[in-house]
Amino acid sequence: MITKRKKQNIIKEVGMHDKDTGSAEVQVGILSRRINELTTHLKTHKKDIHSRRGLLGMVADRQTHLRYLQKKYPKRYNAVVRKLELKK
């Protein structure tokens, strides 16, 4: 679970301004953090199927946001990918 402090750090890092919570960049950042936390959870709890299903939904949602950014705003897409170190 992401605390308010972690969410605020993500918004400061990726967002356009302090109160930016709905932009695609912030959504990708928050989803990435939640995906990382769930991945570590699933490494220890291999049979937790409900969490795995939620993880797959989050990955699909993040991919949709990234595709939107790549299509509409390529510069912002490149900046987010670089900041969050998503593609290697």
Image (tube, rainbow, N blue to C red):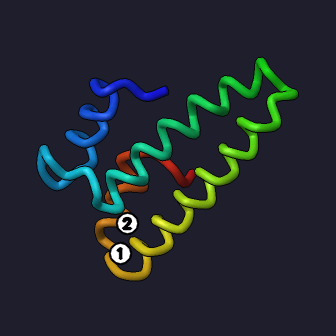
Residue shown at the point (79%, 21%) measured from the top left: 45
- Where is residue 41, by image quadrant? top right
Q: Is residue 67 left or right of residue 20?
A: right
Question: In the visual, does 39 lie left or right of 65?
Answer: right
Instruction: Kindly identify the residue that appears in the image at 33 percent across and 57 percent down.
Output: 25
Task: Check residue 77 in the rendering and tell me which mark sits there, or answer none.
Answer: 2
Disc 2 marks which amino acid? Tyr
Q: Are marks 1 and 2 in contact (CB under 8 Å)?
A: yes
Q: Quadrant of residue 39?
A: top right
Q: Nearer the viewer, residue 58 or 75?
A: 58
Spatial distance from mark 1 to mark 2, Cα to Cα?
A: 5 Å
Q: What residue lies at 49% left-to-right and 26% top-to-bottom?
A: 1
Residue 6, placed above or below residue 35: above
Q: How far across and down, in percent of the image, does residue 22 sit?
A: 29, 57
Q: Secondary structure at mark 2?
A: helix
Q: Secondary structure at mark 1?
A: helix
Residue 23 in which image quadrant: bottom left
Q: Position of residue 65 (x, y in %)?
A: 46, 65
Residue placed farthest to the front in the image?
A: 50
Residue 86 in the image: x percent, y percent?
51, 50
Q: Nearer the viewer, residue 7 or 16?
A: 7
Question: Which amino acid type corresponds to the residue marked 1 in the rendered image?
Answer: Pro
* Crowding at mark 1 (Cα within 10 Å: few <14, some 14-19, many 20+): some
Q: Residue furthest top?
A: 44
- Residue 33, image x and y in percent? 47, 37
Query: Callout 2 environment at 10 Å: few (<14), some (14 to 19), or many (20+)?
Result: many
Question: In this rendering, would 88 be left or right of 73?
Answer: right
Q: Which residue is mark 1?
A: 74
